[in-house]
Structures are given as structure tokens and as C-alpha cells.
Image: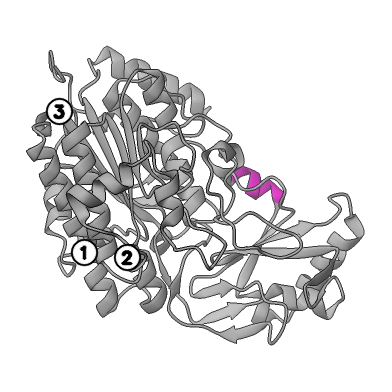
Amino acid sequence: MKKLLFSIILAAASAHGFAQQAKHVIIISIDGFRPDFYREDKWATPTLHKMVAEGVSADGVRGVFPSVTYPSHTTIITGAKPMKHGIYYNSPFEPDGATGRWYWETNLIKVPTLWDAARNAGLKTASVMWPVSVGAKIDYNIPEYWSLDKNVERIAPQRENATPKGLFEEIEQNATGKLDAQKLSSDFSSADENGSRMVAYIIKKHKPNLLTFHIFAVDHAEHAEGRDGEHVRKAVAGADHAVNNILEAIEQAGIKDSTAVIVTGDHGFVNIHTAIAPNVWLSQNNIYTKTGNKATWKAQFHTSGAAAFLMLKDAKDQKTLAQVKSILNALPESQKKLFRVVDRAELDKVGTDPNVILALAPMEGVAMSGTLTGDAIRPASGGTHGFFPDFQHIQTGFIVAGAGVKKGVILPLIGLEDIAPVAAKLLGINFNAPDGILYPGILAPARKNAVE
């Protein structure tokens, strides 16, 4: 039904004269981005407020499940939900224990990306710090990547995997000065400043048609302080300044009139007060135990952000599944009210990892922990994400302004998967977003020779 509606809307858009309006599209993601950052005056975000006045913005963007960084960013550039694009979490489920690796490599993505579509159309692409971009066929790429070896300097893998070879060093020489792990650390807003200088250099020198950039210090601050706090306010102001650096670079490059800029995010944020460790219940019933580095299990919960996902060692083990369900059903009402069980039918609908048997979605204010020991219910503080995307605080934001975009339009709610179709349509490239839909009300009527 959605695909039929998609076809009808595209046909209507074509009939009303919508065509390629932007020669350049810049997609900026602010990790932990929230609509109140540009809807409320208390945040020091003059750049974002100006973009809202000059373009289209959403009151909220519904994310994916789990609402964490890597699946979300992959949805932004594919228009697909995790079930289809294959990046289910930040870190893959590792049954014998987490090694610390994340979904870094682009070849793990199972559907075409905007980068692929732009390349196939003969356009120039660039990316800085974007998740799941290692090895991507991007003309100018500095991927988000780090080594599992603690003896390896944090940003060394980024230097080694930047394309073309020497790009990282060229940027250091001409735009940022010598960089190290501290200068690109999410502990400090200077990381976003340096990232924006990388982007600005690439824009001014190479004028890519499609560029993706990940700003991440806001997320780190919100994990520490929740939705508000001194560090959060500084990080949000820093992110706004980073966006302004990019807008200035676009103007300095002489491409302002032919460029559209999208600012979006991967998830919102929630203040937490309590954590649940469901693997403790499995350990108490000898379903999942660990001695040293040796794990013995029939079922275990893989936690990702605030949510927990049940994995069976044997997918056909109905006896163990029934036992887990019985354990959950037998919990006191005072504990059961802290979360709900999401069955496979609902997981299919929201597009979650097909290997999951069921998931635990906590209420707002409660998060999941993967630990096996201690109390199953414990105090927690700060903020997190990963929640089932069905309430306001976990929603992220969306602003688009510039070439080919209407002014002053407000969208009540869109999906994260609906962003890729906007970028593709603005660039005039052929792209099939498996789960996304284009809202033609975002686009300005086509102007003759708009991008020439």
C-alpha cells in the first residue's frame, strides 16, 4: 500500500513540475539531535533557527528500533529500516561476548546507498565521520573507525582508511592543523569544530555533489547529563557553530544558490532513573551463565541502548523460549510495568533484526543493561536512547533549506527513512528507498535551469 502511495505521489510531483533543483546536497547529522533544539529559544542555535525560517522543518522524526546511531545513520542514507539494510545495532551480536567491534564496514549494508546512487549518476561524493562508511566507494572519505587494539592511536585507522590516500594529512596541513585523539574526542565540542573544518575544506576544494557529515559531541554530553545540563548546552551551541562553518564554506565556494542542506539526527534522548538487567533473570534460571570468559547459554538478551533483544542459540528451541516467557510472566507487577514485551510480528512491522525472537522495550526513564550479575533492577542516571520509537522524547529532528526547498513549511512528523528520498529528488538521481516516501510538499516548484 505504501509503495502504491509512493508511486502516486511521485507521479503527482512530476506532473506539478518538480525536478532537480540542487547541484549539491549536504547531509549533516547531529548525534542526539532533538526538535526542541530549533523549536525552543533557550538553546543557543541561531544557525538552526535561521534554517528553519528559510526552509522546511519537522516537529519530530520517528526513528528505527533500536534507536541507536549506526542503524539510524544507515537508514538515513538508504531509506531502509534495519531489517532490510542489515545494520541492526551499533555492535553486532557476538554470542560468546562482545569484542568491542562495531558495524564499521560499508560492505555490511545490504541495500544501495545514496553514495552508490550518486556515483552511478556520475556525481562526486564525500563523507566525514559517517558511521558504516569504511571502504565505501566515496570520492573523498574520512570514515568513523577505530582499532580494537588499545595500543593503536585512536584516529590512526581513520588516517589509514581515508580516501584518497593522503586526504587526512592534506586536511591537517591546510585546514585543521595536526590532529590527535583528543582533538577528535566526543568529550569536547572542539571535535565537531575540527570535523566541520574538514568538511569545509572538502567543500571549498572539491565541491562534491553529495556530502555526509556526522557531528557527535552532543550525544556524549546527553549520555552524561541527560536532556539538559551545562555540557549539553555547550555541545549544542558547538554543533550549531559547526553547521554555520559549513554554510559559510558553501558560500565561500560560490555554490550557495545551487546547494541544499539537510540537518537531521539519529535519535532523541531520554533521562533515565532506573536500569533493568534481564540477563540476571536468565542467569538465575541457568539459561545463561558465564565463568571467566566461557559462556554457557541457551538464550541471552543482547542489549542495544535502552532496549534488549532475545537471541536463542537454537532458533527452533521452543522449550527455552517458553521458559523465558514464563520467567517474564512470573515477575511481580511492580517490575513488569517497567517494560513491555515486543513480539516478532511487531518487530517485523518496525523493521528490526530478523534474528530476534522478542524484545523488551522499557518505559520512558528506564533502560536495559546487559550485565549478568547483581540486582536485576538497579538505579541509573544520565540519559540514553535505543527506545522503541513511539514517544516524543526519542524522536529526532529534521531541517532542510536551500536550493529546491520551500520556505516556512512545518511537517508534524516524518520517518527517518523518508530523508533519503528528499536528498535523491533534490539531486535528480534515480534512487529506490525501500521503506521511505517522498513528501513533495517539501520541494519548491522547479525553475528552468535551476542548477546550471
Q: In which quarter of the image is the C terminus?
A: top left
Q: Earlier in the sequence, mark 2 or mark 1?
A: 2
Point out the stretch of residues depicted in magenta.
344-349
Which residue is denoted by mark 3 in the rendering?
A: 258
Q: Earlier in the sequence, mark 3 or mark 2?
A: 2
Helix or strand or loop: what does disc 1 sit on? helix
Which residue is pictured at 59% across the width and 57% down the height?
101
The type of residue carrying mark 3 is Ser
Say the numbered circle drawn on residue 131.
Answer: none
Task: Residue 347: say if magenta.
Answer: yes
Which residue is denoted by mark 2 in the rendering?
A: 218
Residue 192 lies, in percent from the top left, at 27, 59
The type of residue carrying mark 2 is Val
Q: In this view, does 98 lie to the left or right of 265?
A: right
Helix or strand or loop: what does disc 3 sit on? helix
Which residue is pictured at 10% across the width and 46% down the height?
248
CA distance separating discs 3 and 2: 29 Å
Against 227, residue 13 (above or below) is above
Q: Residues within 10 Å of mark 3 (few under 14, many from 20)?
A: some
Which residue is denoted by mark 1 in the rendering?
A: 238
Verify CB contact (< 8 Å) between mark 2 and mark 1: yes
